[in-house]
């Protein structure tokens, strides 16, 4: 890989092109901030107009392409992602910092998604049901929605764009992707793959640029039918207000404040492995990251001691070096945000057991020590707000019921985890935890593409990505009645 910045253009109507206003944004290597990874064109509302026009024109034809034929393009995307997996993973690790093994996992999620939704091309099942009238047939069919604007974050720069675009495409929609401005090169490479898969012009479109500018323009645009956003709850609230006013379909996947419960009967070694991976994997920059550990009082001292010991051994450094376990935060602003939360924790009376500081001058990267905060009560800000960094708080609990109550006492509801050997508690957890995802004896991270993904409360707006559930986001149900009786039959009247 050369150190020459990669030039990232928009992809509109099957053509690579610079934004109209000539603006530019840069992405940097967070492990070495002075290295510019990519220079991307920066779009404005005029580029949004062009992309919407192209996507609207293409929609007329794409929706009529038989779904199995649409799916063939997705199979091709899957094959090309496999062929270019290492290239994409290396670029991702450079552009947003995650360790190379995790970056490979991110691309693999895209591959899994491509094959899963390609398979849907020969399913997209509807239902048939009996009619209450004679000589009448009833069924449901999935209809595409139209032009879908997809706005994505930087933390899964291949997986999340794939999660959104591939189910949208197989359902017969056309798409406009607006990736995060920290990861334009990952999006650009994904679109090289889309271009090579030969979607008809205008079916897949890419707009680089700032969320405030083009994200809002996409939400406002009357030619956009559906907006799907993964990002912070604050951004979600902003687009929800616009989409409410403009009557757009809206799918939101937002923040989390996920907890792992460790009961006194848990396999502590297993729970420890889970806590380390959940809290510090992707440097804590996952919507499903474990940011609260709810520890039973009987095991808290031992578990904490072992956790500290293991945390001290974690190897921090550039993600591209395979032996490093913890990469940098994505950018200096994120580094400042995590630092600010440590000050908040200190002022609230929390105790820093380990970490709590940035690693200054480590090749001018955005590195922060894995941090464990003790003496935290459920009302403290660090126990309630999403930090999005390698920071986990310890909260002591004395019963399972108390643990569940604290776990649920948050405005978010994405992922959750319980370590226990007690089958009754496992089922109680499945029933009583308020979250979209519950793991039993596994960490809060580890979603698979064929299961629904998403959360309750402020984590979303009731939709799910991935799995079959994503088809409900990207298609509408149509009920079809076929009367072959040759006469007017009035439902609820003539058959009574
Ligand atoms: P962010 O909200 O700052 O940005 C997300 C996307 O929205 C980016 O593409 C950004 O450019 C765009 N955007 C920003 N302001 C906008 C606006 N006013 N209108 C329209 N678009 C706008 O989030 P981020 O920092 O990129 O990502 C981190 C957040 O994403 C965290 O809160 C994390 O929990 C969340 N996240 C959630 C999931 C999930 O599936 N629930 C997955 C990954 C990340």
Image (cartoon, helix red, strand yellow):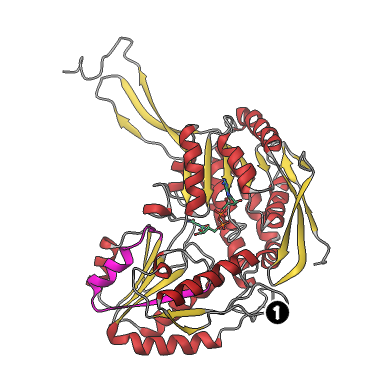
Give the residue furthest to the top: 487
Q: State the image coordinates of residue 254 (x, y, percent, origin top left).
A: 47, 54
Quadrant containing ligand 1 reads: bottom right
User: Position of 327 compared to 201: left or right?
Assistant: left
Residue 123: tell me if it is visible. Answer: no
Give the residue furthest to the left: 496
Q: State the image coordinates of residue 237 (x, y, percent, origin top left).
A: 47, 47
User: Position of 37 compared to 478: left or right?
Assistant: right
The quarter of the rendered structure image containing the N terminus is bottom right
- For the residue pair 339 and 253, the one nearer the viewer reads as 339
Q: State the image coordinates of residue 118 (x, y, percent, origin top left).
A: 56, 47
Residue 217: tell me if it is visible. Answer: yes
- For the residue pair 117 and 182, the one nearer the viewer reads as 182
The residue wearing badge 1 is: 361
User: Position of 200 compared to 470: left or right?
Assistant: right
The picture quadrant where one finds residue 359 is bottom right
User: Position of 353 compared to 11: left or right?
Assistant: left
The picture quadrant where one finds residue 427 is bottom left
Q: Which residues fall within the magenta stretch?
A: 390-414
Residue at 24%, 66% in the rendered image = 428
**In what element is the residue under mark 1?**
loop
Residue at 40%, 78% in the rendered image = 349
- For the residue pair 84 and 447, the one nearer the viewer reads as 447
Q: State the image coordinates of residue 484 (x, y, percent, origin top left).
A: 35, 16
């Amino acid at each position: 890989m050369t150190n020459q910045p990669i030039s990232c253009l928009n992809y509109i109507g099957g053509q690579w092109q610079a934004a109209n206003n000539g603006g530019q944004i840069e992405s940097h290597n967070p492990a070495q901030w002075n290295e510019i990874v990519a220079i991307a064109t920066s779009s404005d509302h005029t580029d949004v107009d062009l992309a919407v026009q192209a996507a609207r024109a293409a929609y007329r034809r794409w929706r009529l392409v038989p779904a199995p034929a649409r799916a063939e393009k997705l199979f091709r995307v899957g094959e090309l992602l496999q062929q270019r997996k290492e290239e994409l993973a290396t670029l991702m690790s450079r552009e947003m910092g995650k360790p190379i093994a995790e970056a490979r996992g991110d691309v693999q999620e895209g591959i899994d998604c491509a094959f899963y939704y390609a398979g849907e091309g020969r399913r997209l099942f509807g239902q048939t049901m009996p009619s209450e009238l004679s000589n009448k047939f009833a069924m449901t069919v999935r209809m595409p929605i139209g032009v879908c604007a997809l706005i994505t974050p930087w933390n899964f720069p291949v997986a999340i764009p794939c999660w959104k675009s591939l189910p949208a495409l197989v359902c017969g929609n056309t798409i406009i992707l607006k990736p995060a401005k920290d990861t334009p090169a990952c999006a650009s490479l994904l679109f090289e793959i889309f271009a090579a898969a030969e979607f008809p012009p205008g079916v897949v479109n890419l707009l680089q640029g700032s969320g405030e500018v083009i994200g809002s323009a996409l939400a406002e645009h009357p030619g956009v039918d559906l907006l799907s956003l993964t990002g912070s709850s604050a951004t979600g609230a902003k687009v929800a207000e616009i989409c409410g006013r403009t009557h757009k379909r809206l799918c939101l996947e937002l923040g989390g404040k996920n907890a792992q419960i460790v009961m006194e009967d848990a396999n502590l070694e297993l729970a420890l492995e889970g806590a380390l991976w959940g809290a510090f994997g992707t440097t804590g920059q996952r919507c499903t990251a474990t940011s609260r550990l709810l520890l039973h009082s009987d095991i808290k001292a031992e578990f904490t001691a072992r956790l500290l010991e293991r945390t001290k051994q974690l190897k921090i450094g550039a993600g591209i070096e395979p032996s490093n376990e913890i990469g940098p935060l994505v950018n200096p602003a994120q580094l400042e945000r995590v630092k600010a939360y440590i000050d908040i924790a200190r002022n609230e009376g929390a105790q820093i057991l380990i970490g709590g500081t940035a690693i200054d001058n480590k090749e001018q990267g955005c590195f922060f020590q894995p941090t464990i905060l003790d003496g935290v009560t459920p009302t403290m800000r660090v126990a309630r707000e999403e930090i999005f960094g390698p920071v986990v708080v310890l909260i002591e609990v004395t019963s399972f019921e108390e643990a569940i109550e604290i776990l649920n006492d948050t405005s978010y509801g994405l992922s959750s985890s319980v370590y226990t050997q007690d089958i009754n508690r496992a089922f109680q957890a499945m029933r009583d935890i308020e979250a979209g995802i519950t793991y039993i004896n596994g960490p809060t991270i580890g979603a698979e593409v064929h299961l629904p993904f998403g959360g309750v409360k402020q984590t979303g707006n009731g939709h799910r990505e991935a799995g079959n559930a994503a088809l409900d986001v990207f298609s509408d149900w149509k009920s079809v009645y076929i009367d072959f009786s040759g006469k007017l039959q009035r439902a609820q009247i003539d058959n009574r």
